[in-house]
Image: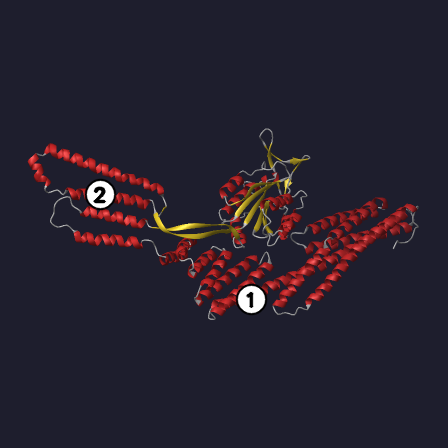
Amino acid sequence: MHLGNVNMLLLLWLAPALVALYLYAAWRRGRAMRVFVEAGLLERISTSVRPGARRLKAALTVAAVAFIALALARPAWNPKPRTVERRGRDIVFVIDVSRSMIAEDLAPNRLGRAKLAVSDMIDRLEGDRVALVAFAGTAVLRCPLTLDYGFFRMMLEDLDTDSVSRGGTMIGDAIRKALDEAFDDQEKKYKDIILITDGEDHDSFPVEAAEEAGKRGVRIIAVGLGDEDQGRRIPVTDENGHRAFLTHDGKEVWSRLDAATLRKMANKTPGGRYLNVATGAVDLGDVYTKLIAGEEKREIESKTITLYEEKFQIFIAVALALLVIELLISERRRRAMLTALVAVIIPALLIPSGASAESPGRLVKKGNRAYRSGEYDAAAQLYDLASVRLPESPVLEFNQGNVLYMKEDFEGARERFQEAALKSRDLLLEALAWYNSGNCAFRQGQRQADSDIEKALSYLREAVDFYSTALEKDPGLADAAHNLEVTRLTIKQLLDRLKEMQEQMKQQQDKLRAVVDSLLSALDRQEDALSEAESLGDAVDRTTPEWKRQLGELAGDQRDISKSTASAAGRLSELFPGEQPDQVRQAAAHLDTAMTAQGDAAGDLGEGSTTDAMPHQRLAADKIRDAVEELTRGEGQQGQQEQQQQQQAGQQQQQQGEEPQQESGDQQVQKDDEQRSETARGIIDQEKENRKKRREQGAEGYRKVDKDW
């Protein structure tokens, strides 16, 4: 026998205490009778009292107390072993604690908001292990992977700008710290990094670190905090305790959100997401439910526990029966006692004790009522209790799958439904289990549609298989047939979207190459203008009409070159109206500098000064060249990625029954693109060589010509 609360056995000491109390009461009663009643009268009075009945009533009361004490100790027997698994993912929170995180564009500040958001998410976790990495100029593992959420909260609350000794913001080092010290390399999945920062990095190569995380199967969910446009000053307290703002070289430091870097990092990992919170609100609990809870989970720990059937009801029933008997027994001699009533009442009280433990069917009914009321946790507990007695019941597996589905744990629900299908001998229940498995896979595909189309397609194809299996088991299952068609339509829509994205990307790259060609033409003309200005500057007589005519033509050419450069810059801005990639943003900055220099050069030429114009022309040429190099950098890698995507699209179309003829054409386009990329680089190299030769000739002296073609 197993006792659930052994300490309650101490109440058994009440039994001997009651015995002593009864003995003392009997002694006091006899003494009082001898004092106040005469001896002859005492004998006559005693004939109406039954001493045996009095002792029996006392014994029944003492026994009832003993049984109540035993019931409170929760006796149980019939042990049944059960294995309990704990499943989840490994989540590492990487939080920026640099001084820029105390900017107050979020209340109370960026770091305070980050800690509140993480704390809210911890309340929603379902068995996942968590770790904490704090970083600034270096990274520190504050909490290793653990299931002890209390310890994690304590480490989280202690985070401040002094948690890391060195200032700065090294996002790449923080990611590498999480990969090397928080995670293990035994499995390349079930891992997430939630990065919370304002994105201002100090040359720690965060994108490369994110790419390494993606290779190790770690997904990054980046949360960007802070004002992206104007930024915010960083408050500090001076030596006198007065509030001030952080300064550097006499100027106030303004901290802005760098969303581009965080978006790149998220895109380098499988299924990664970037959440642009900026100065708004974020609910990480909702993020967990939508992005993490439904993902694949692994077994974190398992243990075998022994469950007992509690039988305290039997002892309570016996105690009540003894007390009822004690009430029915009279200490006085009476002719009729309700013996028959005792004989009826006692069995009536004892019968429920044998059946007091609820049956599995009753537990299932209670669980169903809780499920219909939306009390899913209570329903899950009742189904678990019933499954202890009926571990092979497919109905219980099915019901537990329904609970997990309503809690949006679609991976766990799929496992339950598939177990129900395998255990069931009822074709209808088996068909419904496969149908619900299809629903789980469909919902998982919906979750991935915005972040990872390939993974979404994989889930949706699994849903097609599940619905098809359900229809094989029960051809009359209309919902399965309807959902099968919906799923196939969704797959087609995703494939169309993937193809459209590839076409849009190709069109954008074609337009970008046209912009590069225009810039190369402007660069060539700018180099010619510089050469002509150098020739005019070497002229001995600068007062002749011919010299002035050539100077006027050169000034007009310089203005035309500036217009061509501005046109190319405008088309570049139109290609990227929203968030611009780093290469485009840097190229645009180079072009702005080039256009400013071109305007200055045109003005100098208009005033007749080739000496002042040439440095501006030279700067303009250099900046146009820098812009072209930025726009063509990594073009070969992009082409390879396009080729891979096109091949994947071709394979998917082949699976859908389309003609797989486009692949070779795409490869030919890729070869043409690579040749154009090489041509652009060759032109740039040739221009550098030409410029070098012209400078060497300039040192030797130029022959005056009408135009240097």
- In percent of width and height, residue 280 lies at 56, 47
User: Residue placed farthest to the left in the image?
Assistant: 40
- In percent of width and height, residue 206 lies at 65, 46
For the C terminus, which image quadrant?
bottom right
State the residue at coordinates (21%, 42%): 58
Helix, strand or loop status at disc 2 = helix
Q: With 9 as the anchor, is 136 left or right in this view?
A: right
Task: Answer yes or no: is residue 198 visible.
Answer: no
Say whether disc 1 or disc 2 marks the residue closer to the N-terminus.
Answer: 2
Q: With 285 as the anchor, is 538 left or right in this view?
A: right
Helix, strand or loop status at disc 1 = helix
User: Residue placed farthest to the bottom in the image?
Assistant: 475
Q: Nearer the viewer, residue 597 or 553?
A: 597
- Mark 2: amino acid: Ala
Q: Quadrant of residue 64?
A: top left
State the residue at coordinates (49%, 67%): 470
State how far apart marks 1 and 2 are (Cα).
78 Å
State the residue at coordinates (82%, 54%): 524
State the residue at coordinates (29%, 48%): 315
Residue with the mark numbered 2: 59
Residue with the mark numbered 1: 488
**Mark 1 surroundings: few (<14), some (14-19) or many (≥20) residues within 10 A:** some
Image position of 305 with respect to 361: above or below? above
Task: Answer yes or no: is residue 419 visible.
Answer: yes
Q: With 419 as the anchor, is 23 left or right in this view?
A: left
- In percent of width and height, residue 137 lies at 64, 39
**Mark 2 surroundings: few (<14), some (14-19) or many (≥20) residues within 10 A:** some
